[in-house]
Image (cartoon, rainbow, N blue to C red):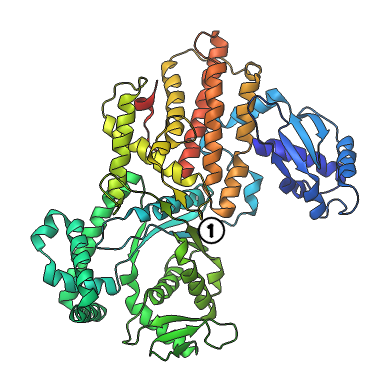
C-alpha cells in the first residue's frame, strides 16, 4: 500500500538528514498518473521542507533539490531517484508495487484498504453529529432538499469510514408560523378524506391556498398567529392536528429516503426545543446579552463596538420564539445528550449568516465547544425541472431519472435481459444524480442537465456503475478457474502499473476530502479509475490469454473491483446492479 512506500522513503530521508521520518510524511505525495505516460510514483516537495524548517529557507531551491537527490541511494524498494523542478522523484520496485498494492485483498483486509495510512494520524477522531436534509413538515419533499440529503450522507459516510462515531440527524422544520398558517388554513380549506388519500399533496394545496388568502386577509393572518400561540401553549386540539401532520410527513419522507439509500439515527425537529428556547432567552437575559429593540423584539447585539449596528432577533414582540432561538436550544441540548466532539450542519449557502450568528451567540453564552461546530454550505441547482412543470418535487425528479434511464437502456444494443429493468434504471439513475452533483465544488451553483447526466460514456454516474458491473461480470464468467500461485511479474505491463499508481493516491484523496468535506476529490478519483480500467479491458484481455496470465489478470481485476466497490461506498449508498448492466 501507499503507506509502506511513503514510510520507506521517509525513513531514507530521515537517515540522510538526521531527522524523524515523520517530518517528511507531509512533504511526500503520490504522483498523479496520465494515460500512456510513465511517471515516478512519489515526489518530495523541497519547498515544504523549507517551510517546515527541515532545510534552510534561503538559497537556490533547485541546488538544494539536486544536492539532496545526489545523497539518496536507490535500494530494493526504491529503484530510481531523480531531481525535478523543486521536487525529488522516487520510482519504486515494480514487482514490489504489484505485491504490496494487492496484498490487503489477499488477506481479506479490503475493507481497511488505505485506512491505516499515517496521513490520518493527524485527524481528530471522536463523536461527530451531522445534521442534514431537514425538510419542512407538511410539505412535499422539494428537490431543493436533495443536495443537503446526499451531501450530508456523504459526510456521515466519510466520517464513519475514518473511525468516528457518527450520529445522523434529520432536524425537521416542524414548528413556527408556517404551522400557524397551515393550522388556520386546514380548518377552512382542509378535508380529512383528501388527507388520507394523498396526504402531502393535500397539505401542499391547503398551504398554497391559505398563503394566498393571508396576503389580503388580516383575519386569516391573525388566525394563524392565534393557532401558533396555541401550539406554543400546548393546547390539545392544536397539538393533535400538528402531530397528525408530522406523522404523515415523516412516513412519506421515509419512502423517499429509502429510494436514495439514506438513513437517519435521529429524527429531531424544532418542536423538540420550543420549551428549551424560552430557557435560552432567560440565559441570554441573565448574562446581559438580551436587549429590547424599538419594535419591542428581543435582540442580541453582535456588533464589535456594542452600538447595536448588527443585531440578531431571538424573540418576537409577542414573546414567541424564532428559528434561531430554537437552534440555540437544540445545539445546547445536543451537546449535553450526544457529547459530540464536532457538529456539522449541511444547508444551502443562503443560511451562512444564520450559522455565523448562531455560533457567535453560543460563544457569547460561554459555550466554547461552538468553535467545533461547522456549517457546510452548498450552491443552487439551476434548471432542475421535469416534464410536469416548474414546481419540482424530489419524487418527480427520481421518477424522471428512472424513466429516462429506462429509455436509454431500452435503446442500447448492449443491455441484457433482466428480471427488473425498472429497479435497475432507478438505481443507475439515482447514482447519476449523485455523481453529477458531486463533481464540482459544493458552494458553486451548477446547471442541471438530464442528457449529460445520463450519458453512458464520459464522466457520469452511469459510466461509473457500468465499469463496476463489467468488472463483476468478468469475475463471474471466470468462476471455477483453477487458482494458481500469484506471480507479480505477470502484471508489469504499463497499463497494470498505471492503475496501481493511481491507487497509490487513494489515502491522499481521502485525507483531502476529510479536510474540506468536499466529495469532488473522491468522485474525480473514481472517474479517473474508470477510464484506466477501460484501457485495461482493451489492452489486458483475460479471454484468450494463457491460464496463468488469465488467472492473475482475473484476480487483479477482482481485487480492483472490490476496492472500487469500497470507494463507492464511501461516497454514497451503493446500489448493486452488476448483473443488470453486465455486458
Q: In this view, does 119 lie to the left or right of 465?
A: right
For the residue pair 218 and 462, the one nearer the viewer reads as 218
> Which residue is drawn at the image coordinates 36% and 41% (left, top)?
430
Q: Is residue 332 left or right of residue 137?
A: right
**Residue 339 position in % (x across, y down):** 47, 66
**Residue 297 position in % (x across, y down):** 39, 87
The N terminus - image quarter = top right
For the residue pair 51 and 162, the one nearer the viewer reads as 51
The C terminus - image quarter = top left
> Which residue is drawn at the image coordinates 38% and 40% (left, top)?
450
For the residue pair 434 and 29, the one nearer the viewer reads as 434
Residue 211 drawn above or below residue 561: below
Q: Is residue 192 left or right of residue 466?
A: left
The single residue placed furthest to the front in the displayed view is 216
Residue 531 drawn above or below residue 368: above
Q: Name the residue under label 1.
A: 126
Q: Can residue 109 be seen in this view?
A: no
Q: Label 1: few (<14), some or many (≥20) within 10 Å?
A: some
- Helix, strand or loop at label 1? It is loop
> Which residue is drawn at the image coordinates 61% and 54% (left, top)?
123
**Residue 233 position in % (x across, y down):** 24, 81
Q: Is residue 125 left or right of residue 424?
A: right
Count the labels in the image: 1
Amino acid at each position: 500500500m501507499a503507506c509502506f512506500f511513503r514510510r520507506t522513503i521517509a525513513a531514507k530521508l530521515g537517515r540522510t538528514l538526521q531527522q524523524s521520518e515523520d517530518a517528511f510524511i507531509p512533504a511526500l505525495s503520490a504522483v498523479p498518473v496520465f494515460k500512456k505516460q510513465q511517471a515516478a510514483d512519489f515526489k518530495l516537495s523541497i519547498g515544504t521542507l523549507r517551510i517546515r524548517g527541515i532545510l534552510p529557507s534561503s538559497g537556490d531551491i533547485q541546488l538544494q533539490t539536486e544536492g539532496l537527490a545526489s545523497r539518496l541511494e536507490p535500494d530494493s524498494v526504491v529503484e530510481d531517484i531523480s531531481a525535478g523542478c523543486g521536487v525529488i522523484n522516487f520510482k519504486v520496485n515494480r514487482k514490489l508495487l504489484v505485491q504490496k498494492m494487492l496484498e490487503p485483498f489477499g488477506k481479506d483486509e479490503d475493507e481497511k484498504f488505505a485506512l491505516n495510512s499515517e496521513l490520518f494520524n493527524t485527524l481528530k477522531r471522536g463523536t461527530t453529529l451531522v445534521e442534514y436534509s431537514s425538510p419542512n413538515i407538511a410539505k412535499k419533499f422539494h428537490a431543493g432538499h436533495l443536495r443537503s440529503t446526499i451531501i450530508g450522507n456523504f459526510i456521515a459516510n466519510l466520517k464513519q469510514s475514518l473511525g468516528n462515531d457518527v450520529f445522523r440527524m434529520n432536524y425537521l422544520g416542524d414548528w413556527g408560523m408556517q404551522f400557524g398558517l397551515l393550522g388556520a388554513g386546514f380548518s377552512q380549506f382542509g378535508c380529512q378524506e383528501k388527507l388520507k388519500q394523498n396526504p402531502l399533496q393535500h397539505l401542499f394545496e391547503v398551504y398554497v391556498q391559505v398563503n394566498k388568502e393571508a396576503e389580503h386577509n388580516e383575519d386569516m393572518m391573525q388566525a394563524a398567529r392565534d393557532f401558533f400561540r396555541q401550539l406554543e401553549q400546548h393546547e390539545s386540539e392544536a397539538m393533535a392536528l400538528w402531530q397528525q401532520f408530522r406523522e404523515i410527513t415523516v412516513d412519506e419522507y421515509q419512502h423517499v429516503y429509502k429510494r436514495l439509500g439514506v438513513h437517519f439515527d435521529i429524527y429531531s425537529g424544532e418542536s423538540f426545543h420550543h420549551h428549551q428556547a424560552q430557557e435560552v432567552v432567560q440565559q441570554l437575559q441573565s448574562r446581559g446579552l438580551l436587549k429590547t429593540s424599538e419594535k419591542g423584539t428581543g435582540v442580541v447585539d453582535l456588533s464589535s463596538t456594542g452600538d447595536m449596528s448588527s443585531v440578531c432577533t431571538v424573540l418576537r414582540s409577542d414573546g414567541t420564539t424564532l428559528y434561531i432561538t430554537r437552534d440555540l436550544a437544540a445545539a445546547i441540548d445536543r451537546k449535553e445528550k450526544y457529547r459530540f466532539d464536532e457538529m456539522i450542519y449541511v444547508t444551502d449557502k443562503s443560511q451562512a449568516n444564520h450559522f455565523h450568528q448562531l455560533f457567535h451567540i453560543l460563544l457569547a453564552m460561554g459555550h466554547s465547544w461552538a468553535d467545533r461546530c461547522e456549517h457546510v454550505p452548498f450552491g443552487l441547482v439551476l434548471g432542475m425541472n421535469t416534464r410536469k412543470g416548474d414546481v419540482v418535487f424530489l419524487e418527480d425528479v427520481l421518477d424522471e431519472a428512472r424513466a429516462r434511464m429506462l429509455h436509454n437502456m431500452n435503446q442500447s444494443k448492449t443491455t441484457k435481459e433482466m428480471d427488473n429493468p425498472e429497479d435497475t434504471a432507478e438505481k443507475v439513475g439515482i447514482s447519476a444524480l449523485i455523481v453529477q452533483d458531486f463533481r464540482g465544488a459544493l458552494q458553486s451553483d451548477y446547471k442541471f442537465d438530464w442528457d449529460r447526466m445520463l450519458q453512458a460514456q464520459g464522466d457520469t454516474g452511469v459510466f461509473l456503475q457500468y465499469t463496476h458491473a463489467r468488472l463483476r461480470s468478468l469475475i463471474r464468467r471466470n468462476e471455477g478457474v483453477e487458482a494458481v500461485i500469484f506471480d507479480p511479474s505477470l502484471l508489469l505491463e504499463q497499463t497494470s502499473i498505471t492503475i496501481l499508481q493511481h491507487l497509490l493516491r487513494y489515502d491522499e484523496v481521502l485525507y483531502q476530502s476529510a479536510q474540506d468535506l468536499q466529495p469532488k476529490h473522491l468522485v474525480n478519483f473514481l472517474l479517473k479509475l474508470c477510464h484506466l480500467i477501460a484501457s485495461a479491458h482493451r489492452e489486458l484481455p483475460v479471454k484468450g490469454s494463457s491460464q496463468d496470465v488469465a488467472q492473475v489478470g482475473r484476480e487483479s481485476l477482482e481485487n480492483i473491483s472490490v476496492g472500487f466497490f469500497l470507494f463507492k461506498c464511501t461516497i454514497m449508498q451503493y446500489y448493486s446492479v452488476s448483473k443488470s448492466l453486465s455486458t
